[in-house]
Image: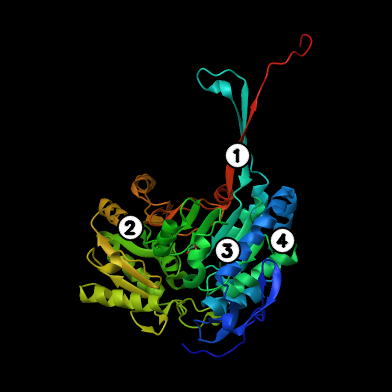
Amino acid sequence: MTTTGETNTAPPTSRYRLAGHWREARPEQELKVLSPVDGSAVGSVHEFTVAEVDEVFAAARRARGAWAARPLTERTGLLHRFADLLAQNADPIARVLTMEIAKPCNDAKDEVVRSADYIRHTAEDALRLVGETQFSDAFPGQARNKLAIAHRVPVGTVLAIPPFNYPVNLAVSKIAPALATGNAVVLKPPSHGALSALMMCELAYQVGIPPTVLQAVTGRGSRIGDHLVTHAGVDLITFTGSSGTGTALARKAGMVPLLLELGGKDPAIVLDDADVEAAAADIVSGAFAYSGQRCTAVKRVLVTRVVADDLVAAIVRRTARLTVGDPRDNARITPLVDPEAAAEAERMTKDAEAAGAVVVHGGGREGNLMRPTVVDHVTEDMDLAWVEPFAPVLPVIRVGSAAEAVRLANRSEYGLQAAVFTCDIDMAIQLAARLDVGTVQVNGRTARGPDHFPFLGTKASGMGTQGVRPSIEAMTRVKSLVVNLREKDLGGRT
Ligand code: G3H
């Protein structure tokens, strides 16, 4: 897609930070960030070498002790100032974000503001992290002569790897809990989104977060990815991305705690008694927000035959209203970041059509700009029923009963979220109990937020729980101090 118009506000790319110090960038190590909007160069980042990655981890190791030793209120105070500065810079960062990842401009700004809110909430919640004490006599045969004080300590150095779809927000959701709890962070931003992430890091340094405590490592995953995830300096990896990459990462990482948010094929289950118009509104926004490039997008509809015609008609009506085009104009459907995702979505759509499914809306693409597509009468033998397209394609599968919907929902390799649309709360609760997913949304679209809610996936959708409090806990480990108590003569009667 070709567009012309306003110029980008990209960060300076003539130098890069290494282990807290500025270095001059060398052209041969420059990685251009090309915009999915129009192919223009939004800017460039330094391509870190393996040796430089080693320097980064060494600097993190040297810096983290002093950071952890600072009073918690000092660390969270810095995070509050970071959040304020981020919110003040929402516009310039959002402009870069829009060009880097083709996110509609209003959504890009929301992402930055949401990130500032996330940091503030984390800074507040980290203050309330408390440990627990236990006396020994709660275990059979033990006297009351030992006291265990279990408290939380930072894990050390956290490797944070966010994806292209939220390069600021999903960076912050990893960085903030890690920093608040006294860890050093090595951030590996995605290639698309690296410029926005670097702008965000600079704001952190401006408020006084040391550039050795939070460091960014840019470059191609194919060059430095393995070195990063297998590095002896890593104490925890928090990664958001595809299930394929997450699984490969888990195999390589070995005995390092992992927090993984991976793919999904979230179903929206619509039952006979559902409010069809309301369900259609949620499904369309859930399926097509940011052109379907969200792990939590509604990626299939499982609707009972009784209401299927009405629901599909309502979905098509609403999908037809979505604007398609340039993210700078806040179009709802914008060019996809990964051109292969567009090609793959088109292939799956065509294959499904050839096998008997009906494309009731959209279907075509121009390069990486895929029209919002609704495919009805999808059946179990089609890829579209199971494969996750990171694209605006919504398959509809008609089912005979709630039980069949549950069976199809659970047959997926993924288990991120599911939505259930019904007016019968008993049915909703019983269905939810049978769905093998991290979260069931009753009468609402699948989504991660509000960000303090627990967020997790089962099966190929992830490992560990995120959200403000769970992430704070995940970035720490329990340390137990056992005090052995000796009888003392107090020298009189009490
Ligand atoms: O793509 C994965 C994100 O965690 C989804 O977040 O539900 O706020 O769009 P979201």
Q: Name the element at disc 1.
A: strand
The residue carrying mark 4 is 209
Confirm whether residue 130 shows in the render: yes
Which sits earlier in the primary sequence, circle 3 or circle 1?
3
11 lies above or below 205: below
User: Mark 2 near mark 4, Cβ–Cβ under 8 Å?
Assistant: no
Q: Are marks 4 and 3 in contact (CB under 8 Å)?
A: no
Amino acid identity at mark 4:
Ile
Between residues 105 and 120, which one lies in front from this camera angle? 120
Amino acid carrying label 2: it is: Glu
Of the residues under marks 1 and 4, which one precedes in the sequence?
4
* In front: label 1 or label 4: 1
Q: Work out whether mark 4 precedes mark 3 in sequence or the reverse, and give the earlier one.
A: 3
Secondary structure beneath disc 3? Answer: helix
Q: Nearer the viewer, residue 128 or 328?
A: 128
Q: Position of residue 485 (x, y in %)?
A: 66, 22
Q: Residue furthest front?
A: 51
What residue is pinned by disc 1? 479
Which amino acid lies under the numbered mark 3 shown in the image of this protein? Answer: Ala
Residues marked 3 and 1 touching at CB (< 8 Å): no
